[in-house]
Image: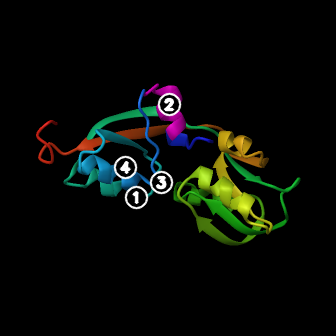
Amino acid sequence: SAPTCSEHVARVDCKFKHVRIYGSFEKAAGDVIIGHIDAFMVAAGYPKLARFIHSTELSLWAVFVARILPLVVAGTLEKMPADVGTVYHHPATASMLPEIGCQFTETTAVQSNVAACRAVIDDIGKSVCITNKLAADRFNLRIYSVLRPGQPMPFLIFGAAKSNHSNN
């Protein structure tokens, strides 16, 4: 499957041996808190990052910077429509909506860049998505424009707070 920016950084840049993909950072955090996994990684661009930083059940273990994949506007049509129905996007890319270069009727936030690609394919209307270039390529979407060429992004690794588990 096409990777999210975080999955790409974990597997390719960090070369982590064991990577489990979750539908949300919150689900991964929950599994850390109950001891099912040791740690989870989240990009600093995630709009709800503060909930992890301020959690009494989590502890910040590390911070590093890695270059994320280019973020693009993509869709299924040969050319980007002048008037788009829906723009699918991850909440972390919401600030880029004014930059997509067309009028749109609505926006729909989805769980990941991969989910944005799937939503565009499933939408029979004139929709586009903001996603990463690798996901757009894997889903055979047309790339209409590059919003960010692959910028440095801080990533944070969280584990359980020491009071949660005796083995930490």
Residue denoted by label 4: 28
Residue receiving disc 1: 48
Q: Which is more foreground, mark 1 or mark 4?
A: 4
- Which of discs 1 and 3 lies nearer the camera? The answer is 3
Q: Are marks 2 and 1 in contact (CB under 8 Å)?
A: no
Residue 26 in percent (x, y) is at 37, 56
The CA span between labels 2 and 1 is: 23 Å
Quarter occupied by residue 38:
top left
Q: x, y percentage for residue 82? A: 85, 65
Q: Secondary structure at mark 4?
A: helix
Q: Is residue 14 above or below residue 19?
A: above
**Which stretch did the figure color magenta?**
7-16
Give the CA separation, mark 1 to mark 3. 15 Å
Query: Label 3 is placed on what type of residue?
Result: Gly
Q: Determine which of the numbered discs, if any, sits on residue 11 in the image.
A: 2
Q: Quadrant of residue 89?
A: bottom right
Residue placed at 38% from the left, 55% from the top? 27
Q: Distance between the Cα atoms at labels 4 and 3? A: 8 Å
CA distance for labels 3 and 2: 17 Å
